[in-house]
Image (cartoon, rainbow, N blue to C red):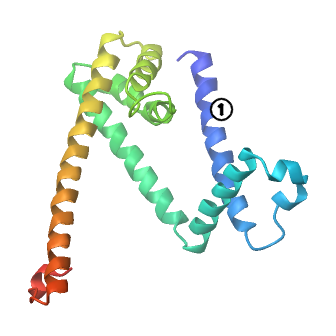
């Protein structure tokens, strides 16, 4: 693999760990002498400081509710699922398993790059990152492009299915609320 790609992946991983640590550190400072109180008044009034205060709220909620382990477990599970999906797509496209598995290990970095707020749902950015990353593993540009588009379509299909289920559940809950408000009886089997 190209050395510059290795360096970028290491920098991304370190930046992730630092950002998560800062998030938790800011959250642990809530209710005590805050790190922000050490800053000059004009800096505390800025937009960046407001963003940091918002991050500290998120960090505080994570720490207060003891959700950090669950967040880590769910994040690892989702990353693993994305890796497996990409590996399956690549092997389905005729890429040999060792190369597909090696490419799939780069998926977490690709997905992180795709989260940059410069496109809609990562479209375009994800494909470009996949072409660069998988190209460093020896794949021609058409295979990473096709795999990334297939992955995006799978995510879109699953999201649409989830949206339909959410709407159906919402309508059922709305009907139950109307029935309860009107005083009609609701079968106990429909209450969750």
Q: Which of the two residues, 135 or 97, is positioned nearer the viewer here? A: 135
Per the image, label 1 sits on a secondary structure element best described as: helix
Residue 62 can be seen in this image: yes
Q: What residue is drawn where x is 34% and y is 19%?
A: 144
Query: Looking at the rendering, which quadrant does residue 31 occupy?
Result: bottom right
Q: Is residue 187 left or right of residue 55?
A: left
In the depicted structure, whether residue 131 falls above or below residue 61: above
Q: Which of the two residues, 86 or 179, is positioned nearer the viewer here? A: 179
- Residue 122: horizontal and vertical position, in percent? 41, 31
- Residue 192: horizontal and vertical position, in percent? 21, 79
* Residue that badge 1 annotates: 11
In the depicted structure, whether residue 12 falls above or below residue 67: above
Q: Which of the two residues, 53 or 86, is positioned nearer the viewer here? A: 53
- Residue 75: horizontal and vertical position, in percent? 45, 52
Classify 10 Å Cα crowding around label 1: few (below 14), some (14-19), many (20 and above). few
Q: What residue is drawn where x is 60% and y is 38%?
A: 13
Q: Is residue 8 left or right of residue 41?
A: left
In the depicted structure, whether residue 133 falls above or below residue 155: above
- Residue 85: horizontal and vertical position, in percent? 29, 37
Q: What residue is drawn where x is 28% and y is 39%?
A: 155
Q: Is residue 95 left or right of residue 31?
A: left
Query: Looking at the rendering, which quadrant does residue 10 occupy?
Result: top right
In the depicted structure, whether residue 86 falls above or below residue 181: above
Q: Exactly how many numbered labels are in the figure?
A: 1
Residue 96 can be seen in this image: no
Q: What residue is drawn where x is 72% and y is 46%?
A: 47
């Amino acid at each position: 693999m190209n050395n510059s790609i290795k360096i970028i992946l290491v920098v991304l991983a370190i930046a992730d760990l630092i950002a998560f640590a800062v998030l938790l550190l800011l959250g642990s400072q809530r209710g005590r002498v805050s790190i922000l109180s050490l800053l000059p008044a004009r800096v505390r009034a800025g937009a960046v400081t407001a963003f940091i205060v918002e991050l500290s709220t998120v960090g505080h909620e994570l720490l207060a509710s003891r959700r950090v382990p669950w967040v880590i477990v769910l994040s690892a599970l989702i990353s693993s699922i994305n890796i497996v999906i990409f590996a399956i797509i690549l092997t389905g496209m005729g890429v040999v398993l060792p190369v597909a598995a090696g490419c799939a290990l780069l998926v977490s970095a690709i997905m992180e790059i795709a989260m940059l707020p410069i496109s809609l749902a990562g479209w375009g950015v994800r494909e470009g990152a996949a072409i660069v990353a998988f190209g460093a593993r020896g794949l021609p540009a058409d295979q990473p492009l096709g795999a990334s588009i297939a992955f995006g379509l799978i995510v879109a299909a699953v999201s649409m299915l989830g949206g339909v289920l959410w709407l159906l559940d919402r309508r059922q809950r709305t009907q139950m609320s109307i029935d309860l408000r009107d005083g009609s009886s609701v079968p106990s089997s429909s209450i969750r």
